[in-house]
Image: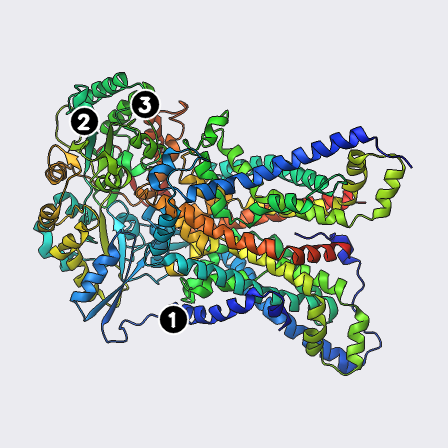
Amino acid sequence: MTVLTPERAASVPAPAGSGAPARGRRGRGRAGLVLVAPFALLLTATVLVPIGYALYLSLFTDRLSGLGFSGPTQAFVALGNYAGVLTDSAFHASLGNVALFVVVHIPIMLGLALLLALLIDSAVVRLRRLWSLAVFLPYAVPTVITGLIWAYLYSPGSGLTALLPIDPLGKTGILPSIVNIATWQWVGYNMIIFYTALQAVPRDVLEAARADGAGGFRTAWSVKVPMIRPTMFVALVFTVIGSLQLFTEPLVLRGFTGSVTSTWSPSLYVYEAAFIANDYGRAAAASVLLALVSALLSALVMRLSNRRSR
Amino acid sequence: MTLRESAGLNRRKFLSATAGLAAGGLLGGCASTTTASGATRVRIWSWLTGMDKYVAGFNAAHPDISVELNVIATGLKGGYAQQTNALRAHNAPDILHAEYQGLPQLLTTGGLRDLTGDLADLEGGYSPAAWAGVRPGGRTWAVPMDLAPMVLYYRKDLFDRHGIAVPRTWDEFRAAAQAVKQADPAARVTTFPLNDGSFFAGMCWQAGEPWWRVDGGSWRVDISGEGTLRTADYWQGMIRDGLVATAPTGDQDWIGAMHTGRLWGLLGASWSVGSLVKSIPQDKNRWAVTTMPTWDGVPANGVQGGSAFAVSAESKVPDAAVKFLRWLSTDPAVAKIGTTFTTPFPGYLPSRDVARKAYKGGYFLGDPVYDVLDEAARRVPDWTWGPNALRIFSTVVDRMSGVKTGSATLATAVRQTQADAVTALRERGLTVLEGKA
Amino acid sequence: MTQSPVGSRWTSRTVVHVLLVLAALYAVLPLVWLVTSATKSVGDFSTTGAFEFGQFNLGANLSALFTQENGVFLAWIRNSLLYAGLGAVLGSFICAACGYAIAKLDFPGRRALFAVTLAGVLVPTTALALPLYLLASQLHVVGTFWAVFVPLLTNPFGVYLARVYAEAAVPGEVLEAARTDGAGELRTFFTIGLPMMRPGLVTIFLFQFVGIWNNFFLPLVMLTDPKLFPMSLGLYQWSTRVTQFPQYNPLVITGSLLAVLPLAAAFVLLHRQWRSGLAAGSVK
């Protein structure tokens, strides 16, 4: 979503004001607080407090007794819910599914986005606007609708299934099917990000490469790609975060096939725990774990990008 | 403001937003129990098709009570989740929708009102299966609305043309399946959906060994009982031998197959009448209904669905709510309204007569639909739904997902489901007994 | 100076265009399917191929769509526009104010706020939905417009973007000049800072719009009254009924087509603006 590098942003100098009068500085301080107040309030209320509440919820569980008809009583179980989630084979399966998804989807989608961006940026292209708009169009389709369209296309009888070697809704076919849906949805968006970054490559560097005898392909691979590497890493981080939250596509497909279980992805696991099994403690624990994994992976990718960019 | 000016669309949005906000504000959190005109406000959540018409009918006839309907997602697709969450969060509506299989799960929130006293006088008027469905554990927790006994629909024209007798037992059914496949290699006698837990439970219900029982003050779970395993083995054989399709009922594949005459039968319930009439209207005068094939001639069949309505324990208007529910369940006007857009099969016997008389028919051949459904309703064996029934539907479907490719059998799925069910209930702190008593 | 030989230039042009055509087809064909399917009736939909036409039934499908359940589909359109349109307008303004302040003004807790904001970008929204639901229940706002609208206003990434744009597009000298002229800080923001950030704001607005338009989990969890559903949730709910009621299929398809058109149109129309916004950001 951003075409700037985190390093570049951090290198901008801090706001000036060393010679300003103290009253002016206080006025700036006050104005600053006023301007950030709405967002700060929203962040606290809709992100920080819920995270805290999730942590709190994850420490408790419900207990029924007899036939269960007199309702649940709350019991403090400390890390019991976390242990339950971490030993739950359904949770392992969901992590496995999403890990497989990430490993397959991200290289394909980002690779394709990069390739298309380079193609559109190449010197020989005509009708640039047409291609970029066409490929970008899927981004404008709401995720649920995308899921529905592809679910119908994957259903037997649509004609598409006859062309494919495996049943897209079968056990082995379901992961590639979901990878395809996610790729279709996001490739255009990332392509535009990369393309815009490519526009920022200084023309004189490209001229120099041309003068040295590099053809289109060589210029693309050896000159352009390295120059947009920071953008690629940022796209990677956001794609990873988004991929870990995979929910809508499997949920929609669940209505069309039995290959997607009720706990197929970690987000589905949380949804099932919270709203079908009504085990709020377990759902909260799974949410916290999901957030932790997200944070760890993002930190990992960002550390990787810092090292590579040096 | 510069920001609003920069995208011309925004001005229009802003104006409509003001109107929308007014509407949104009105819908926000109003909890009063009387309407502007002084009528008692009763809030109901339901996904029942046509509930809006029933509510309108009631409101017209009872000016002192104003029932407000909120249409929610179908139970298993979110409706139960929404209601359970609302009950736990103490902002549930006055009336909740619970199919018989979902009622015990709602009960575990502790949020439903005991209606034993309010409904005691209605006891004799319902099909026993419907009445039993609202009395898990011996108290009455909901008002029955309809019942969905399972029956066999079949292409009478094709069966007659090819000399296939109507199967009365499962052995005969297998023979019929083979005959169908022989007559037309692309056709099958029916589909056995592997994605529908309530269907599978309904088929196992017929064997007469309930998956759950109340034993003393605890639950007894017997999903892998003899009867269920026999059912599982039978259908495993049918699937393995390619005698039935496995397409989910109602999905694209199924509709296509029905349209092109590749499915000669349907193991359905009373509401399948509507599905057939609406999805294949051109098959008029081709289908007939009969009772489900039996195990060795013992007349029995399960139930797949049927709605009931419960009252929230925290409702501030329980008397008005009960009044509405009694009307919904027993008033002949409801059956009359129902017949205008569906083929209702009320749990209340006098209402069922009204529906039967109003049924115009004209689609099915053979025995009259209501006669068959009545007989089916009489044949329903005893059964109790456990507090994790809905979850078990998901579980058994998950466990059955390998059946199509051969990596699992229905029997293994059933045994795993038994283990899952027992574990799930024990995890919630309940004492669970296993197997037959 | 060397020039690539004409021959290889021709092949590379062909190769490039073939690949682009394939990519464009991949992107567009499912949408073409959506259009053709929206013209079919229930029966035709299941029996005719993906790109054939059956009987032209679009008119009937559209009228069925808008009359179903007393025109609830229109309410869904209105709701989507409110959540996403009004939400993105308000949200991007809030982000702009915050980003500008972090970039250009010094106030206590500036660094802490920015650090927390960055962390907020990393939190998965699905992890927040359950606690938000429970909190909303306690405040008795579950099932209201606000339960969905307010959380979706929060856009930490937008603040990050706004900070970057503010630093890039609003020079310190201009602000200094305004200060020496005696203008208050807030006044400076509205009259000078905000206009200078405009292309960036359009970008933030558009991405927040799409983000809210796409958001499904939160409305799914918070809302029970169909009159408050955004389009995607409403269509999803209908799609869950198609097994029992196949007549919902044409409604879901036709509704999906209508759900795609406005966003696609918005992007095509505002193409220039958000491209320039992205470009401005990338140059600086």
Identify residue for label 1: B26
Quick check: marks 1 and 2 in contact, CB under 8 Å? no
Mark 3 against mark 2, which lies toward the viewer? 2
Pick the quarter of the image with the N terminus of chain C.
Answer: top right
Mark 3 against mark 1, which lies toward the viewer? 1
Mark 1 against mark 2, which lies toward the viewer? 2
Would residue B352 appear left or right of A3 to someone viewing this image? left
The answer to which of marks 1 and 2 sits earlier in the sequence is 1
Question: Compared with residue B169, is residue B145 higher up or lower down, i.e. above or below?
Answer: below
- What sort of colour scheme is used for the picture? rainbow
* Separation of residues labelled 3 and 2 (CA atoms): 25 Å
The answer to which of marks 3 and 1 sits earlier in the sequence is 1
Q: Residues within 10 Å of mark 3 (few under 14, many from 20)?
A: many
Identify residue for label 3: B239
The answer to which of marks 3 and 2 sits earlier in the sequence is 2
Would residue C68 appear left or right of A254 to someone viewing this image? left
* Separation of residues labelled 1 and 2 (CA atoms): 56 Å
SS category of the residue bearing label 1: helix
